[in-house]
Image (cartoon, rainbow, N blue to C red):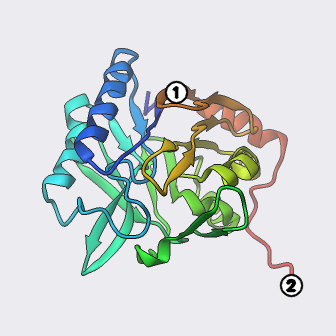
Amino acid sequence: MVNGGPMKIAAIQLQSVLDPALNLKSIRKFMDEAQVRGIEAVFLPEVFYSMSDGTRPTPYLIDGKNEHYEAIRKLASDYEMFILGGSAATLVSGKVMNRAYNFDPHGNDIATYDKMNLFSCDLSKHPSNTVINEGHVYTAGSSAKMISIGEWKLGLSICFDLRFPELFRSYSANGANLLSISSAFTIPTGKAHWHTLVRARAIENQSYVVASAQWGKHNERMSTFGHSLIVDPWGEVIADAGEGEGIIFGELEMSRIEQVRSRLNVLREPKNYM
């Protein structure tokens, strides 16, 4: 439960394409399963609504409360669940932001977060020949965002933010006990670093981490690693989606956080070592 007792959550792993209708169909299929299980909160991956080829924005931009915004909002209200963490390309004052949306079970907009650290990767000499620069598509956000879901304090992040531990330490310093890392990690970087980095963010902040991810070949240019994760505050993996579209489940317990934090007193005020 959100207030008292474990919170039952799920993370959906998608193979999103450009057409949002197809992506919503997949999401609703998994949310049907989540509803049967009594899930309270569902975490979605990065750019779940529409996946472009990375050279230009998707044409299906959220702009104010247009039909694309409403389609996402209705996921929460139709299923009466929290929809958390997942991002969609959003037009803001003529700029495209990679924006994470969060809705309560009534479809009320809790808060949004704009991705601050944009991915830039040149693996042209790697067999994957992966070259991506999100700065050609998106404008970076400028501020972190935490939201409250009952006793849970959720720090929001998107994909490449994972590589900036200072963001997550700032969340911890402000009381976070749950971290969302919605992602579309590339295959070479995912194989090399994904599990290590996600578990590290859980361990060093003694917080639960829910890392919903994209998987598979989305178009001619974009392929992603998958392996959506739910990790506990000791760094133990509760669930790993592996490859393929799917949904994973977990129960988050405040007592587990208290148990882990009583072992190691590491969540002190950040120090300046210079």
Give x and y (percent) for residue 70: 17, 50
Q: Point out the image quarter for the N terminus.
A: top left
Q: Which of the marked residues, 2 or 1, is nearer the chain's N terminus?
A: 1
Q: Point out the image quarter for the C terminus.
A: bottom right
Give x and y (percent) for residue 111: 34, 58
Can residue 7 be seen? Answer: no
Give 61 or 174, whichever is nearer the viewer.
61
Q: Which labelled disc corresponds to residue 248?
A: 1
Q: Amino acid at mark 1?
A: Ile
Q: Which labelled disc corresponds to residue 274?
A: 2
Sort mark 1 into few (<14), some (14-19) or many (20+) by Cα contacts within 10 Å. Answer: many
Q: Which labelled disc corresponds to residue 74?
A: none
Mark 1: secondary structure: strand
Q: Does 193 sit above or below residue 34?
A: below
Can residue 61 be seen? Answer: yes
Mark 2: secondary structure: loop
